Image (spheres, grey):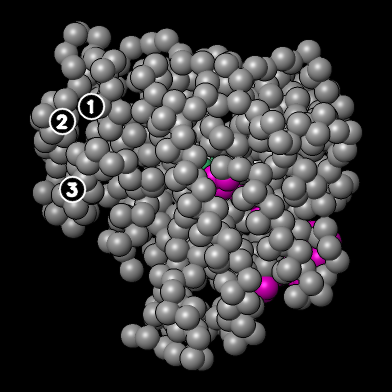
Amino acid sequence: MEHAISEKLKIVGELSEDAKEILTPEALEFLFNLHVQFNERRKTLLQNRQERQKNLDAGEKLDFLKETIEIREGNWTIAPLPEDLKDRRVEITGPAVDRKMVINALNSGAKMFMACFEDASTPTWENMIAGQINMRDSIRRTIQFTQPGTGKQYSLKENSAVLLVRPRGLHLLEKNVLVNNEPMSGSFFDFGLYFFHNAKEALARGTGPYFYLPKLESHLEARLWNDVFVFAQDYVGIPQGTIKATVLIETILAAFEMDEILYELKEHSAGLNCGRWDYIFSYIKRLRNQPDVILPDRGQVTMTVPFMKAYTSLCIQTCHKRNAPAMGGMAAQIPIKGDSLANEMAFEKVREDKRREATDGHDGTWVAHPGLVPVAMEQFDAVMKTPNQIHRKREDVVVTAEELVAVPEGTITEEGLRINASVGVQYIASWLRGNGAAPINNLMEDAATAEISRTQVWQWIRHEKGILDDGRKVTLELVYDILQEELAKIKNSVGEQVYQSGRYDEAAELFKSLIDQDEFVEFLTLPGYEKIS
Ligand SMILES: CC(=O)SCCNC(=O)CCNC(=O)[C@H](O)C(C)(C)COP(=O)(O)OP(=O)(O)OC[C@H]1O[C@@H](n2cnc3c(N)ncnc32)[C@H](O)[C@@H]1OP(=O)(O)O
Ligand SMILES: O=CC(=O)O
Ligand SMILES: [Mg+2]
């Protein structure tokens, strides 16, 4: 049902009691203004991404921008960090929609909690509203939860983590809010509502409106966000520079504009983060039609392969030069229940990953699960005796444009192809069911990791080097056969009833549609969004 709030603004989604608490007339007025001010620019920037893709398809070699050399060579820093953003050695992440998880994350012992409206969340209307309710109650420290069945009570402990919020990326829409009959941007919806309801309250409580910005592809996109922040701060009447945002460097194009992104946001910057999963996805996506670029099995693209090492090293050096934190990323391992040996192996992988990040000079890292907070903390505590390592300038690092795109060696295997097909479908099914973060094969999967799976399959089918180590070419027919076999295995493991209600066939259809078209679909969540409310 459509609710006309005014002639220019309509709510398509259900106006539940929760929605009414969040979508107040004043908050809607603010969203309306954000849309009117910034939506055309957002659309133009998305169009720029497509223009850039055309150039890359035509053989453009990526390089640092000529027109911004003065920024790269200039002597400037970001504005000083607020006290509660100086020590970020362990940050836990999780979907904003899961109320219990939000409380557990805030109580986990991690310094920060990044509440996600993006890749760990399916953006149903209900989820997005519930996430906003959870954020409002977290900032006010009134958030509580009772576990159905056991009656276990959850509420906040005294020293809870600092809250950071990740809105949806610029490409996603919120179809349940129409401004002038046009869906509004998911980014502005998530940012706008969180900011409007909580910025002043957060400040009064000694923290601030803090954000993570996902999937930026250029410094012009950072400029858009900066202008949104300036507008928003004026609108509610809080000092400029109050908002602090950490930009995820998780696209191959952004890696060439790290200085410029920090520069655009410098009054509002809280540094950069190496979002490794989207980065791998973006590397394949943007360079997919370059004849020499192809990646081996997902499992072989580790953080120590040259192009990943080059990117994280450059991120640390760039951030520290500008007095900005350089955050590490997410190891995919999560605790494994009922198998202590496998669990210890998973923990050791996380330890190794965090040790490398701390030693390289990252100022903190991400974990996906409370059980991993002490594991990551131990590694950072051992290396980082100060709140951060910004003083380690890593002037020894030299990274060239060629190193950022260097194609790693490795093999494509039938096993790798099967994992991509199976995990891709299982994740999409989970996403369609409303759960955007899922444990699959004892690894954390979210939209970014699923994007790698389907993009690899798309590319292996089309690339002349998409050949299995046993000599077989990866073809659509081979993938279809494997997909059928993997679906049968899934059905066997979850049972007929769960399979039928679990949207697996629909997920398989979506997966197929992503790999059988020559035209690459920019994000799997775009056709996915048409299948949810
Ligand atoms: C590439 C990227 O974008 S990474 C960032 C986005 N991804 C994420 O944020 C994923 C975060 N992680 C998760 O969502 C979860 O850990 C999952 C889905 C991977 C696994 O969840 P589950 O299967 O529920 O884990 P598990 O059964 O071990 O949970 C045990 C307890 O830990 C809690 N828990 C698990 N993960 C988290 C988390 N990230 N934050 C807070 N609490 C958590 C559960 O709430 C549960 O609490 P309880 O004992 O009070 O009931
Ligand atoms: O957002 C994080 C990533 O790895 O992608
Ligand atoms: Mg990401």
Residue 128 placement, left or right of 455: right
Q: Which residue is mark 1?
A: 461
Q: Residues within 10 Å of mark 1 (few under 14, many from 20)?
A: many
Residue at coordinates 55% horizontally, 26% vertically from top-left? 62
The quadrant in which residue 148 appears is: bottom left
Instruction: Give coordinates of residue 401: x percent, y percent.
Output: 61, 20
For residue 130, above or below residue 71: below
User: Disc 3 and disc 1: Cα gap in Å?
Assistant: 17 Å
Rendered-image quadrant of the C terminus:
bottom left
Choose the circle earlier in sequence order: 1 or 2. Answer: 1
- Residue type indicated by callout 1: Ile
Whether residue 382 is visible here, answered yes or no, is no
Specify whether 243 is left or right of 213: right
User: Amino acid type of disc 3?
Assistant: Glu
Which residue is pictured at 59% across the width and 87% down the height? 25
Q: Residue at x 72, y 69 (%)?
A: 232
Give the SS element for disc 3: helix
Which residue is depicted at the point 45% across and 58% down? 172
Q: Nearer the viewer, residue 338 or 427?
A: 427
- Do residues under tags 1 and 2 come within 8 Å of each other at their CB atoms? yes
How far apart are the alpha carbons under marks 1 and 2? 6 Å
Q: Which residue is mark 2?
A: 476
Span of residues in magenta: 196-216
- Give the mark nearest the N terminus, 3 or 1: 1
Question: For mark 3, what is the residue?
Answer: 509
Q: Is residue 199 left or right of residue 306?
A: right
Examine the image and state in which quarter residue 209 appears. Answer: bottom right
Q: Position of residue 294 (x, y in %)?
A: 37, 20
Give residue 158's quadrant in the image. Answer: bottom right
Q: Check disc 1 and report its element: helix, strand or loop.
A: helix
Judge whether 112 appears above or below 283 on screen. Answer: below
> The disc labelled 2 sits on which kind of residue?
Leu
